[in-house]
Amino acid sequence: MGKSQETFSKREREKQRMKKQQDKKEKMNERKSGKEKPKSLEDMMAYLDENGNLTNKPLDPRIKKTFNQEDIQIGVPKQEDKEPDTPNTGTITFFNESKGFGFIQDSDTRERVFFHVNDLASQVKENDFVSYWPGKSPKGPVATEVTLAKR
């Protein structure tokens, strides 16, 4: 006896296609018969509560806060480029002496900052607490004048 040319996946796809057509016909018949009652504007409204969550009930006017349109800032404000008065501090998390580079994790921002051995002012090793002056490079933040510091 010959095997059926139709595989399991083909039968499943055909069943899904037929079910989709049937659902579409049912929806069309419901729209034509008018069984769906139109929603009122109040049913379609959504409100925000004082915590920023969506609700279907309006907010109590006594709790309501008003904001000026001019005070709202859209986007992230630009950081001003200013020269720091004191050096940043951090811990050396990685240092490869043979290749001559490493990374410092800043103690304030927890940001990883790259440094090169040419920027070292004293001998350092991994897990040393250091102070450095932040700088910028095309690839990101860098540390200059890296020296050992006291905790």
Image (cartoon, helix red, strand yellow):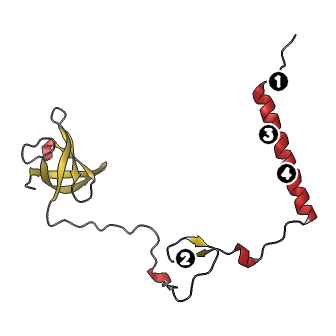
Q: Is residue 138 above or below residue 88?
A: above
Disc 4 versus disc 2: distance between alpha carbons? 37 Å
At 12% from the left edge and 41% from the top edge, which residue is drawn? Answer: 125
**Mark 3 or mark 2, which is nearer the start of the sequence?**
3
**Mark 1 or mark 4, which is nearer the start of the sequence?**
1
Q: Amino acid at mark 1?
A: Glu
Q: Circle 1 is placed at which residue position?
A: 6
**Mark 3 or mark 4, which is nearer the start of the sequence?**
3
Answer left or right for 144 relative to 121: right
* Label drawn at residue 49: 2
Which quadrant: the C terminus? bottom left
* Label drawn at residue 37: none
Q: Circle 4 is placed at which residue position?
A: 24
Disc 4 versus disc 3: distance between alpha carbons? 12 Å
Disc 3 versus disc 1: distance between alpha carbons? 15 Å
Q: Circle 3 is placed at which residue position?
A: 16
Q: Nearer the viewer, mark 4 or mark 2?
A: 2
Q: Amino acid at mark 4?
A: Lys
At 90% from the left edge and 66% from the top edge, which residue is drawn? Answer: 34
Disc 1 versus disc 2: distance between alpha carbons? 56 Å
Tag 1, which secondary structure?
A: loop
Q: Nearer the viewer, mark 1 or mark 2?
A: 2
